[in-house]
Image: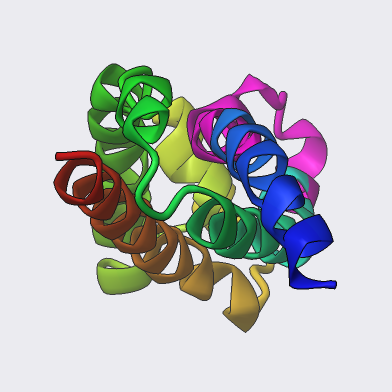
Amino acid sequence: MSGGRESLRPILGAVGLVLLWFGVLAIPLVEITTCTQGSEDAWLGSLFIYTPLSGIVVVLAWIGSTRRSWARWLSLPLVPLVPWAGSVAWKYLVGVTIERNHVCAVHSGEMAFNSYPSSWIVALWAPVQFCFLIAVIWSAIRFWRAGS
């Protein structure tokens, strides 16, 4: 019985790592929105849909890639993606979470968006993304150490 599960581990790990790239990429892609009338939908959708799915993907990658040398190579695309995603999340951490600006004001640079109502939960977007990125970095370090 455990042999069947053991044969699924590499598949789960490979799928998890590839999906992890997209989970990290989803952070900067939130900026493709237009912010029509101060809409926070892209950030809220990312927070409630993409982030939980990305957390599941981290777990899949962890389960499937222990002691697999190929995991380190599949984690290489994360090297440019994580800093890019981190810089985007940092912009919103400072602008929205700390300075309390509207996400669209930070996104577009138009401070007129600060007159629009803002939901309190959107201020959690950047801290949650940083927690996800820390899990991704920790995973990548684990893959590189386990593959030796």
Judging depth in this view, the residue of 93 and 75 nearest the camera is 75
Q: Is residue 21 magenta?
A: yes
On the rendered structure, is 118 left or right of 94?
right
The stretch in magenta equals: 19-41
Residue at screen point 47% across, 42% down:
105
Q: Is residue 36 magenta?
A: yes
Residue at screen point 75% across, 49% down:
8
Can see residue 46? no
On the rendered structure, is 97 left or right of 13?
left
Judging depth in this view, the residue of 24 and 97 nearest the camera is 24
Residue 138 x/y as whole percent: 25, 59
The quarter of the picture where the C terminus appears is top left
* 79 is higher (above) or lower (below) than 141: above
Residue 106 x/y as whole percent: 41, 42
* 127 is higher (above) or lower (below) than 104: below
Residue at screen point 64% across, 57% down:
60
Residue 73 x/y as whole percent: 34, 20
